[in-house]
Image (cartoon, rainbow, N blue to C red):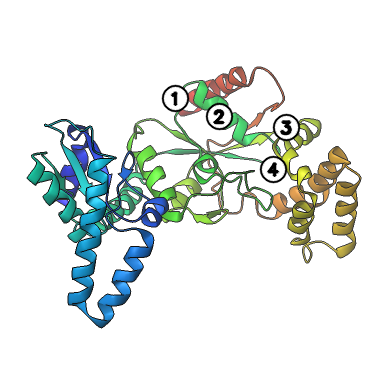
Amino acid sequence: MKDLRTSLDRLHEFDQIIDARTPLEFAEDHIPGAINAPVLSNEERVIVGTLYRESPFEATRLGAAMVARNIGKHLDTLFVDRPRHWQPLVYCWRGGKRSGSMTTWFDLIGWRAKKLDGGYKAYRHLVLETLSVKAKQFAYIVLMGPTGSGKTRLLQALSKAGAQVLDLEQVAAHRGSLLGALPDIAQPSQKAFDTALAAMMSKMDPSRPVFIEAESRKIGAVTLPDALVDGMRRGACITVQAAKEARVAFLLLDYQHLFTTPDYFKTQLSKLIGLHSKETVAQWHALIKSDQRARLFEDLIDRHYDPAYARSGSSHFSESAHSLQFAFDPTADDCIAQAGRLLQKVAQIRA
């Protein structure tokens, strides 16, 4: 791990980071900034892996031929304009044959290539270690409040006002609720989420507080690191309040895309049957059908969101001596000024 950490700490010394794994492996997660130059395609890796169970020799021979052809293609296309003293860092799953083959060819050409010892597997372990260690180093200030109170917008305004912010929903590409999937944006894989989160936390200053929105252990399909969840639940809390009209306006803005796919919207709300009667959900469906958007969200606030928040909104978070209430208008034009006032209050409390 020490050699891996040394290599990663010296990434700036390399001209390029090359991921030699398949496109599917690369899409799931990769070292930030890496480009994909697969020495085996998705299909070729399956072919070689299947044959290996029958004959390791034949699989190795076939794989070598495939690898040689693919590296040759990359040399004629992707790497055709690389200068004589080009110095890349190459990795594959375990730092074995795939990255070793590419590094060998690069060295024969005269490029100063280096293989990442342990490959992506070792990097993945380092990401998890980083999350576990870094998450414990920060003092968190947790924004709480019912749905539509503007917590995310306040978090964004705090960042613009100079605060240190960790926007988990942005990293997760999800708003964290039943309706939280973002239009036309897929969530990252768990591994890609962890990688992005570790990269962000590595750049943060442990001497400064971190503003963060209260979240459950899962945001959509991704799970938060245990150390981060524990740190959040020990953090000082700020309860964000907003007028009901502002909350409705905020929800209308954030969830307007759902009205373009009414069947999906109705299907998601139908998942609340059990918490709410079939008759109540049917009424919400009718409001979608008649395009009564404001009335729908007013009813969801009154009958679903606020009761749910009252039941569980603060049950996992500490009643900190530094907790405070903050009235935030998410529809106002001076959100950054509002965030500045909050920072002043927090500074006075922490002084």
Where is mark 3, residue-wise?
242
Where is mark 2, residue-wise?
156
Identify whether 313 is placed above or below 141: below
Identify whether 221 is placed above or below 334: below
Q: Estimate the x, y position of residue 321 in percent, counting from the top left.
A: 53, 39
Asked if the residue under mark 4 is in contact with the one under mark 1, i.e. CB atoms within 8 Å, the reply is: no
Asked if residue 265 can be seen in this view, the reply is yes
Marks 1 and 2, how far apart in space? 24 Å
Where is mark 1, residue-wise?
351
Marks 1 and 4, how far apart in space? 29 Å
Q: Nearer the viewer, residue 108 or 341?
A: 108
Which amino acid, mark 3?
Ala
Which amino acid, mark 1?
Ala
Residue 137 placement, left or right of 281: left
Name the secondary structure under disc 4: loop
Name the secondary structure under disc 1: loop
Where is mark 4, residue-wise?
146
Which amino acid, mark 2?
Gln
Q: Estimate the x, y position of residue 286 in percent, counting from the top left.
A: 90, 52
Asked if the residue under mark 2 is in contact with the one under mark 4, i.e. CB atoms within 8 Å, the reply is: no
